[in-house]
Structure formats: C-alpha cells, structure tokens
Amino acid sequence: MTRLIPLYRRATAELEAHTQGLLPLFARLTFAATLLGYFWASARTKLGDGVLGFLSPSTGAYAQIWPRQFEAVGYDAGQLGLFHWAVTAAGTWAEFLLPLLIVVGFATRLAALGMIGFITVQSLTDLYGHGGIAHPETLGAWFDRVPDALILDQRLLWMLIFLTLVLKGGGWLALDRLVARRLAPAAQTA
C-alpha cells in the first residue's frame, strides 16, 4: 500500500500538469452551451427601439430590474432618475458583453467576476423585487432531493462555472492565452 501512494501522487501530478487548461475550457463551453442564449435573450428584451435602443432601455428592462420602483411610478420610466437609467443600461450592456468575453476567453477572470456580481444582483432582485422569496418552489433548498430549484440550486451551479473561471482563467483556446503569449516576448526584452 505504501508504494501505491507515491505512484498515485505521480500519476495525478502528471495528469494535472498535462490538463491544466482543460477544466476552464470546459467551464467556458458549458457556459456557452447552457447559459449564453439565456443571457442574450434576456438582454434583447431590455433593448429599446431603434438603432440607439441600447441607450434607451425598454419598459420591460425597468420592470425586470426595478419591479417595485417601476410599479410605484405607474410604470412610467420617465419618472425614474438617472441612477435607474444608468443601472438598467449598464446591466443590459453587461448581459451582452460579459457572456461574450467568457465565451471567447478574453479578460476571462474579470468577466467571470462580473457575472458573479450580476447573478447575485439578479437573484436578489428575483427573490425580493419579484417576490420569489415567498415561493418555496422557486427559492428551493440546498441538501434536499430536488435539484432543480430556480434560485438556490441552479444559480449555485452557475456560480461554480464562474468561480472556476475566476480561479483558473480561460484555459485552452482562450484569447487571454494568445494575448499573454504576445505580451511575453515584449516583457522579456524590456
């Protein structure tokens, strides 16, 4: 048995050395396959009309992001302030840009950290702004036998993908690696 432990350690060290970029690549592919369409479809609902629709969020955007405040002003976005517009517009832009950065693997750690913040705010809005906290089937529970609660179960799995990317970077086939290779010779000659 004592001979097996060093053999196991060498084998796992070799495996880790040769597959270091694989886990983050799979995290990015998993995100692209399961969540990219979700976030972009959601972001499209927040765009206003016309070419400059990204500067004038739709009424649906305000209803999704500020449900109680929007209701309080009679669903008139003009009665909301500059802060509400800025958060709504920035949230819409982030919902397009951060997923794109993750899929191509550019500024991956920062984009994944941004998505963690985005999902935290999204979850809190769903729970408290839209009243999901009062619905146990929406909220869910950890350590139960039901793995598909919309908030606690699903969003925890989403966070695992993003946390992997924050800690490990973009992995193989990421633009981050290409940029790092391009900058490495310049840093050595300086």
Image (cartoon, rainbow, N blue to C red):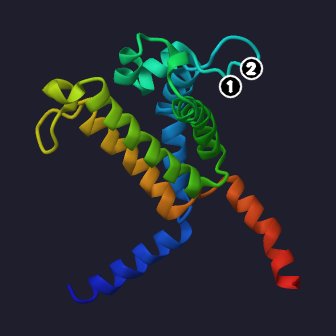
Q: Residues within 10 Å of mark 1 (few under 14, many from 20)?
A: some
Q: Residue at x 57, y 15 (%)?
A: 58
Point out residue 81 in the picture as x, y percentages from the top left corner.
53, 28
Q: Image quadrant for the N terminus?
A: bottom left
**Disc ID at residue 155:** none
- The residue sitting at the bottom extreme is 2
Q: Relative to residue 83, is residue 173 drawn left or right?
A: right
Disc 2 element: loop
Report the amino acid beneath label 1: Leu
Q: Image quadrant for the C terminus?
A: bottom right
Q: Mark 1 points at which residue?
A: 55
Please say if 9 is above or below 76. Answer: below
Please say if 40 is above or below 90. Answer: above
Q: How many marks?
A: 2
- The residue sitting at the left extreme is 144
Q: Relative to residue 140, is residue 108 drawn left or right?
A: right
Point out residue 144 in the picture as x, y percentages from the top left corner.
11, 39
Point out residue 183 in the picture as x, y percentages from the top left corner.
80, 69
Query: Quarter of the image holding residue 9?
Result: bottom left
Q: How far apart are marks 2 and 1 (CA)?
A: 6 Å
Residue 23 in view of the camera: no
Q: Residue at x 59, y 58 (%)?
A: 171
Disc 1 element: loop
Please say if 49 is above or below 131. Answer: above
Report the amino acid beneath label 2: Leu
Would you say the residues marked 2 and 1 are in contact, meaning their CB atoms lie under 8 Å apart?
yes
Query: Quarter of the image holding residue 169?
Result: bottom right
Q: Mark 2 points at which residue?
A: 52
Residue 137 in view of the camera: yes
